[in-house]
Image: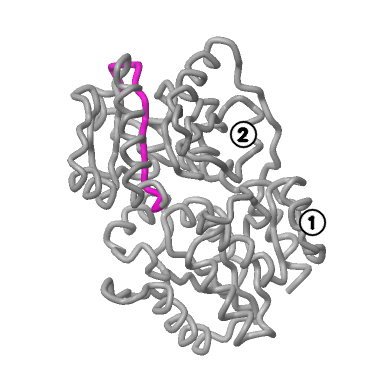
Amino acid sequence: MKKRILTILGTRPELIKMFPLIKILDKIYDHKLIWSGQHYDYDLVKQNFIDVKLRSPDVKIKINKRKNNFIQIQEKLIKIINNYRPTAIIYHGDTFTTLATSLITNFFYPNIVKIHIEGGYRSGDKSQIEERARTTSDQLSDVIFVTRNQEKKNLYKENIKKNVYIVGNSIHESVQQILKISDKKKINKKFKNLINQKKFILATIHRAENVDNKIRLKKIVNIINKLAENNLVFFPVHPRTKKKIKSLKLKLKSNIIIKNPISYSETIYLLSKSIFCFTDSGGLQEESAILKKRCIIPSNKTPHFFYLHKFANHLVQIDKGNYMSDVEKFKRSILTNKIKSFSHKKNTSYEVIRILKKLI
């Protein structure tokens, strides 16, 4: 009889990084995919499943927007786990879903193997919700898969030494697979006018610490307007971000194309055609480096130090008074510093499977 494994996800970034592994888990195990409802509108997320050619989840949790979604996720996951009784549970990264899953499985299900994919990242900024989620989840996990030796060292410093495995970063697989399976002709047709411009910047902003902070959001809009002085900016705006910009009556220059969120395949293709990107997305920081595109990040710290050292990513110290000086510094670095090449482990998903077979 096949071992039963649950994979629990709740956000688009988790889906993007995990879809190569999920496809393999489906073939080898009695594998159940659970959608936690953290990104509560599944209809908005559904296109991403289609985009990466992944089946629908076995269970889709529905969240009441008026209630605390973190508590709801925990309560409903307990019922799901009681129903399926898996041998192991897999969760990814540093989201509310990851934290909720690691907490309830550690407390209520000590015999279930708790597996954290992409553990060990540390920004050093405890004010970030993600930092608190990833550190707690690592402490509560039985098995942790990390991307590089640096993440393993981070865990060792916290006395987490057992069952820590370096497997590489699955985002490399995700990018390569999506470039192969995406309908480039369709994307070219949809964004013909933009791509014909040849020189454009891709911008995205969604993190709560930026969108919900009036001062930060005003600074971010200032930066986007500054970048638009010399280049066209393509800005697919998350509904929540758009609402905040509108409520604060912030103005964006006419050289900024504002659109609704786009699919993953469209994002990666447009990123590959852009000059560089401006984003607070952890995923785009990695994807831009893989595609050898520079990336400006409006944040004081990032867990993705590796790409900073390769000249691919550049931090804008958004809480500084002279934050625009970091933008100017970035512009100068384009002229003087080339993006360094970097090696990475291939076939991360198969490496995870190889280790899982031994452990469970």
| Tag 2: amino acid | Tyr
The residue drawn where x is 78% and y is 65% is: 163
Query: Could you tell me which residue is drawn at 82 percent across and 63 percent down?
Result: 161
> Does the magenta-highlighted stretch encompass residue 84?
no
- The residue depicted at 44 percent of the width and 84 percent of the height is 75
Mark 1 sits on what residue? 157
Q: Position of residue 288 (x, y in %)?
A: 51, 32
Q: Which residues are magenta?
A: 195-208
Hey, which quadrant is residue 271 in on the image?
top left
Quarter of the image containing the N terminus? bottom right
In reply to whether residue 199 is colored magenta, the answer given is yes
Name which quarter of the figure residue 42 lies in: bottom left
**Residue 179 seen:** no
Q: Position of residue 331 (x, y in %)?
A: 47, 16
Q: Amino acid at mark 1?
A: Lys
Compared with 143, 272 (above or below) is above
